[in-house]
Image (cartoon, grey):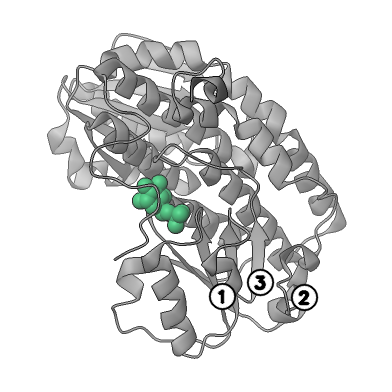
Amino acid sequence: GAAELGPYRHYMQKEIFEQPRAIADTLEGVTSIQPELFDGADASAARVFKDIDSVLILACGTSYYSGCTAKYWLESIAKIPTQVEVASEYRYRDSVPNPRTLVVTITQSGETADTLAALRHAQSLGMTHTLTICNVATSAMVRECELAYITRAGVEIGVASTKAFTAQLAGLFLLTLALAQSRGMLSDTEEARHIKAMRHLPAALQAVLALEPQVIAWAEDFAAKENALFLGRGMHYPIALEGALKLKEISYIHAEAYPAGELKHGPLALVTSAMPVVTVAPHDALLEKLKSNMHEVRARGGVLYVLADADSKIESAEGLHVIRMPEHYGELSPMLHVVPLQLLAYHTACARGTDVDKPRNLAKSVTVE
Ligand code: G6P
């Protein structure tokens, strides 16, 4: 009811603004990296982590994109080979099982039929080491997995997932550090640096939420469009995918995401002045390459909407709209960059008058196939 919404118009907006609290709660009490954080009812994570040589992530929808982001962390920080697969595909294809793989399911509800079936399929192939990142402690998924990390995003009502996604990323970053430690790849200095960055996340998220008025100005342009393209590179490519998914789900604008280096292999053909191009442009090793991708878009008359970093030299100009992120955030940057994209989808949908919390044809939790 209206009382629970407080100052917000929709649950989705409320949940976007609850992210600082969701992350603080999910990371509460974590002052060092310990495998015990992931222990299951009858299983020790320390023992399981010693027994594995790779990771297979299975999930659907927004949860799949948190898995895609985590792959970058797991391979770069924990140096563990990682595959990410859509649950509904994995369960129906012939794959090569490895009993030393840690199967990681990611699910807000813990009840998604395809993700549960994918877990059971992996178990039937002899993969017994399973871990879930899940927001519901009493769910079927938590019962059926050997290990678990329960995110504390709180109840999520908006069909389009927001706070559960960033909470999953927090859990997946912790998992990355725990696996790095177990593999002897996490020095005390690095552990302390990461813990400090994680503890600062709620304040950093708050600063990003303060960008809402600037995102509303973008949304006014987007409301009149029928297509949008999202670009990102590296670990921000899954964030571009998630931004496109949010826009599709609630505003019904057709949106696609591409890793920016692929522009020239297809999507550039779609770029005209009618095509807004959202670019996630943190100041990282790929920024110079991304800038040349942006020039390719400008040269075709495409209009750019850029999330630039505090310290990157990208200025607003004709056909180039820039929102500057408050601070540069290293490995955890995807958790901050997704927030303006959630707000963009939300305000665009509001401007188009759609049913934001209950988009047509979609359900919060898909418990049948
Ligand atoms: C549905 C929801 C999405 C969600 C997906 C996976 O499609 O509309 O928001 O990401 O299910 O749900 P899960 O509970 O497994 O994370």
Q: Position of residue 182 (x, y in %)?
A: 76, 71
Percent coordinates x, y for residue 355 in the rendering? 30, 28
Q: Residues within 10 Å of mark 2 (few under 14, many from 20)?
A: some
Which residue, given by chain and number where applicable, does mark 3 sit on?
147
Disc on the earlier residue, 3 or 2:
2
Residue assigned mark 2: 46
* Side of 78 relative to 185 (left or right): left
What amino acid does circle 2 point to?
A: Ala
Q: Is mark 3 in CB contact (under 8 Å) with mark 2?
A: no
Secondary structure at badge 1 equals helix
Q: Earlier in the sequence, mark 2 or mark 1?
A: 2
Is residue 118 in view from this perspective? yes
Choose between 57 and 347: the one closer to the eye: 347
- Check if mark 3's residue and mark 1's residue have beta carbons within 8 Å: no
Residue 76: quarter of image: bottom right
Eyeballing the image, is 116 above or below 162? below
Q: Quadrant of the C terminus?
A: bottom left
CA separation, marks 3 and 1? 9 Å
Residue at the spot x=49%, y=51% of the render? 66
Q: Secondary structure at mark 3?
A: strand
Is 247 placed above or below 10 here? Answer: below
Could you tell me which residue is drawn at 57 percent across and 50 percent down?
A: 168
Q: Nearer the viewer, mark 3 or mark 1?
A: 1
Q: Which one is in front, 366 or 240?
A: 366
Label 1, on which residue?
Answer: 144
- Badge 1, how many Cα within 10 Å: few under 14, some, many 20+? some
In the image, what residue type sits under mark 1? Glu
Say which amino acid is labelled 3.
Answer: Leu
Name the residue located 68 percent from the left edge and 84 percent from the top edge.
51
Residue drawn at (53%, 68%) of the image? 140
> CA gap, disc 2 to disc 1?
19 Å
